Image: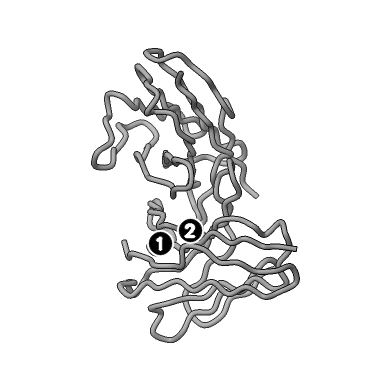
């Protein structure tokens, strides 16, 4: 499983765009990049997953360069409720039976008024 | 989306007693469930992988005799913390993957907070 590295914490203000970058230098050819969000005393919640280039959903965008050694989670116009810990994970190929997730340190995002 | 439910949400017990935490997949069948432990301000630590109808696979350093895992059906896995001690106080989270998870997405339970006095 590829190890991931991301900033321990980030601060932002309401309405700003937040970009959280994750490094995964040892990502394998068939691996996918997945981001989860966790609020205090709750289980993680899936945000977005991608393999290459750009993926966008109603919550966030995920940018993955051609070498796939890093990825950036982009949260447009954050609000106070986006204060949470964000985890970047590298997961094996889809439909491989099960996905064993190993969580790194995560990035603690604090959004202030 | 798929729902994974944990029960109880929180539990307080005396040192030396055993505590059982249930993890249920409510609207899908989960061939595999995972159990995590999370201490305050720390990341999730994978404890074990639970497969329906077979023995759980424990991560290095996790005592299988202390953390008993049973995955008796495709919708239920249980974690029993035996002879709990204050150092076992933690947030326990399960996750489940369906029979055909085409997105690779895992669904997590709400977590169970254990406090051992």
Q: Which secondary structure lies at badge 2?
A: loop
Q: Quadrant of residue A63?
A: bottom right
Q: Residue B9 placed where, x, y %?
A: 59, 29
Chain of the residue that carries numbered disc 2 in the rendered image: B
Tell me if B108 is positioned left or right of B37 in this view: right
Q: Residue furthest bottom?
A: A66
Q: Quadrant of the N terminus of chain A?
A: bottom left
Q: Nearer the viewer, mark 2 or mark 1?
A: 1
- The residue where tag 2 is placed is B104
- The residue where tag 1 is placed is A91
Q: Quadrant of the C terminus of chain A?
A: bottom right
Residue under the point 52% across and 82% down: A53
Q: Quadrant of residue A27?
A: bottom left
Do marks 2 and 1 share a chain?
A: no
Q: Which secondary structure lies at badge 1?
A: strand
Q: Residue A93 placed where, x, y %?
A: 39, 64
Residue under the point 38% across and 45% down: B45
* Number of marks: 2
Instruction: Please report contact status of discs 2 and 1: CB closer than 8 Å, yes or no.
Output: yes
Q: Is residue B34 above or below residue A89?
A: above
Residue under the point 39% across and 34% down: B52
Q: Is residue A111 above or below residue B10?
A: below
How packed mark 2 is, by other alpha carbons closer than 10 Å (few <14, some 14-19, many 20 or more), is many
Q: Residue A9 placed where, x, y %?
A: 51, 63
Q: Residue B76 placed where, x, y %?
A: 49, 30
How packed mark 1 is, by other alpha carbons closer than 10 Å (few <14, some 14-19, many 20 or more), is many
Q: Estimate the spatial distance between the alpha carbons at disc 2 and disc 1, rounded to whole Å.
A: 8 Å
In this rendered view, identify the residue nearer to me: A32 or B19: B19
Residue under the point 50% across and 54% down: B101
Chain of the residue that carries numbered disc 1 in the rendered image: A
Which circle marks residue A70 in the picture? Answer: none
Q: Is residue A99 above or below residue B7?
A: below
């Amino acid at each position: 499983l590829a190890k991931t590295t991301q900033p321990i914490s980030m601060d932002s203000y309401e309405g700003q765009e937040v970009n959280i970058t994750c490094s995964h230098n040892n990502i394998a050819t068939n691996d996918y990049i997945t981001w989860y969000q966790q609020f205090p005393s709750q289980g993680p919640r899936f945000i977005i997953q991608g393999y290459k280039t750009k993926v966008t959903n109603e919550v966030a965008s995920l940018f993955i360069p051609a070498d796939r050694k890093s990825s950036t989670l982009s949260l447009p116009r954050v609000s106070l409720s986006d204060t949470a810990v964000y985890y970047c994970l590298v997961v094996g190929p889809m439909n491989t039976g099960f996905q064993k997730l190993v969580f790194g340190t995560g990035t603690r995002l604090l959004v202030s008024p | 989306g798929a729902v994974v439910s944990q029960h109880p949400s929180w539990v307080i017990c005396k040192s030396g007693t055993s505590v059982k935490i249930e993890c249920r997949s409510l609207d899908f069948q989960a061939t595999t469930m995972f159990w995590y432990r999370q201490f305050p301000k720390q990341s999730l630590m994978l404890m074990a992988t639970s497969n329906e109808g077979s023995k759980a696979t424990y991560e290095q350093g996790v005592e299988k005799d202390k953390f008993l895992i049973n995955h008796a059906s495709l919708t239920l896995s249980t974690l029993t913390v035996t002879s709990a001690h204050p150092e076992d106080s933690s947030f326990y989270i399960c996750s489940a993957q369906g029979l055909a998870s085409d997105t690779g997405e895992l669904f997590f339970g709400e977590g169970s907070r254990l406090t051992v006095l």
